Image (spheres, rainbow, N blue to C red):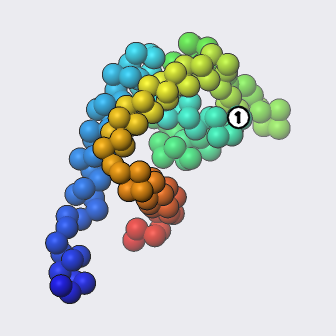
Amino acid sequence: MSKLWVMLDRPDLAAMAAPLTRALMAAETPILREHGLSMWAYVVLLGLDARPVRTQAALAESIGADKTRIIRVLDDLQNRGLIERSPDPADRRVRLLSITPEGRRVRDGAQAGIRRMEERLLARLPDGDREAFLRALRVLSALPPQEFR
């Protein structure tokens, strides 16, 4: 069988990944709801943990959100004591963000629930395939956007 036939004999990556992504997000929604989080709130809490303090603009860019869109999410998280926003001593017009211990607790609880759900799904794969699948996802998800053009 030619290499071209093998390439044509499978759906496009997006055709395979999109339904999986939608199903994963749908499965995560009730878990996040149990912890009082929206998907964007969870993404913000995950993003803040990567670097404890950053500007709203830098956070928005790193999580792929419009900086004006996440303001409402940040307001809610701050009002609930899950994050803190403080003026940057170097530029008081800029707000620095940090996750609070309560924010970390809520985020960790939600993440643990999501990981349990993921483990049930990944258990359907043989160990070698599972590790290869996770390795491939890490590599492809780390590619810069220009690689897809």
Question: In what quadrant of the picture does the N terminus appear?
Answer: bottom left
Taking the spot 67% from the left edge, 19% from the top edge, the residue there is: 101
Q: Nearer the viewer, residue 85 or 147?
A: 147
Location of residue 88 with respect to 32 vertically, above or below: below
The foreground one among 21 and 74 is 21
**Image location (x, y in percent) of residue 41:** 48, 27
Residue sitting at 40 percent across and 15 percent down?
34
The x and y percentages for residue 135 are: 48, 57
Q: Is residue 81 left or right of residue 30?
A: right
**In this rendering, position of residue 79 left or right of residue 33:** right
Residue 99: image quadrant is top right
- To which residue does mark 1 refer? 52
Look at the picture and state if 102 lies above or below 39: above
Secondary structure, mark 1, is loop
Q: Position of residue 70 (x, y in %)?
A: 49, 32
Q: Considering depth in this image, is 144 or 79 the residue closer to the camera?
A: 144
Residue shown at 78%/37% (left/top)?
91
Q: What number of labels is visible?
A: 1
Residue 64 vs residue 98: left or right? left
Q: As drawn, which residue projects farthest toward the top?
A: 80
Q: Residue at x 56, y 25 (%)?
A: 108
